[in-house]
Image (tube, rainbow, N blue to C red):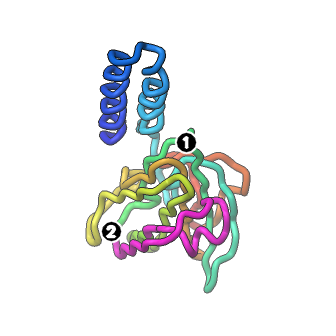
Amino acid sequence: MVRDGIHFALGLAGAAALVGWLGGPLFSLPLLVVSAFCLYFFRDPERQIPSGEVVVSPADGKVLAVCPEPPARTRVSVFMNLLDVHVNRAPIAGRIAALDYRKGRFLIASRDRAALENEQNCVTIRGDSSEVTFKQIAGLIARRIVFYKRPGDCVQRGERVGLIKFGSRVDVFLGPEWLIQVRPGERVRAGSSILARRR
């Protein structure tokens, strides 16, 4: 469980108790439902991290697109809906080589324009023989990108590195040395689903 979820749930449960005391149990029910949803939304299950020279998905969700990205990379876009786990994980092991946070709009994350115009956090991880970049992109409802690491920090493949609150998208950029293993429409899980294997 992400700590933020506990804080939200406790705050809403306290408000529900107050409303129930002042107006009756029926009036507190909506707040209790939202409190329970916060506990569900901020869940953080353990994952089995695959071994070998692979790139794992940094996010739970549905693969929106697998498409070429200039100059010679492939972009894999994963869309997270409100029911997906929103904890993000490192796609490869290595060192955080670059971090670029940009403020922006809050368009629907599944649209192509969102990758250019929405609030986002772009992270490059440099491994032993390759580097992978992924971009946390805020959405229409998601208004908070969280990233726990700093440039120079070392991460392990599948390690928790952040989250995006309440629905969003993550784009992963892979060089020609990677053979893509997923297709649009597939469901993936952060830290355990393999997006690509080393050629």
Q: Position of residue 74 (x, y in %)?
A: 63, 72
Q: Is residue 119 magenta?
A: yes
Q: Position of residue 92 (x, y in %)?
A: 44, 61
Residue type marked 1: Asp
Give the mark toward the camera: 2 or 1: 1
- CA–CA distance between discs 2 and 1? 27 Å
Point 59% across, 64% down: residue: 107
The mark that comes first in sequence, 2 or 1, is: 1
Corner quadrant of residue 78 = bottom right
Q: Quadrant of the N terminus?
A: top left
Q: Is residue 24 magenta?
A: no
Looking at the rendered structure, the secondary structure element under dot 2 is strand
Q: Are marks 2 and 1 in contact (CB under 8 Å)?
A: no
Assess disc 2: are there few (<14), some (14-19) or many (≥20) residues with their C-alpha within 10 Å of its C-alpha: some
Q: Which mark is residue 95?
A: 2
Q: Which residues are magenta?
A: 96-121
> Does 39 appear above or below 186?
above
> Does 88 appear above or below 129?
above
Residue type marked 2: Arg
> Does 172 appear above or below 189?
below
> Does 84 appear above or below 196?
above
Point 47% across, 50% down: residue: 51
Can you identify the residue that label 1 sits on?
84
Closest to the observer, 10 or 110: 10
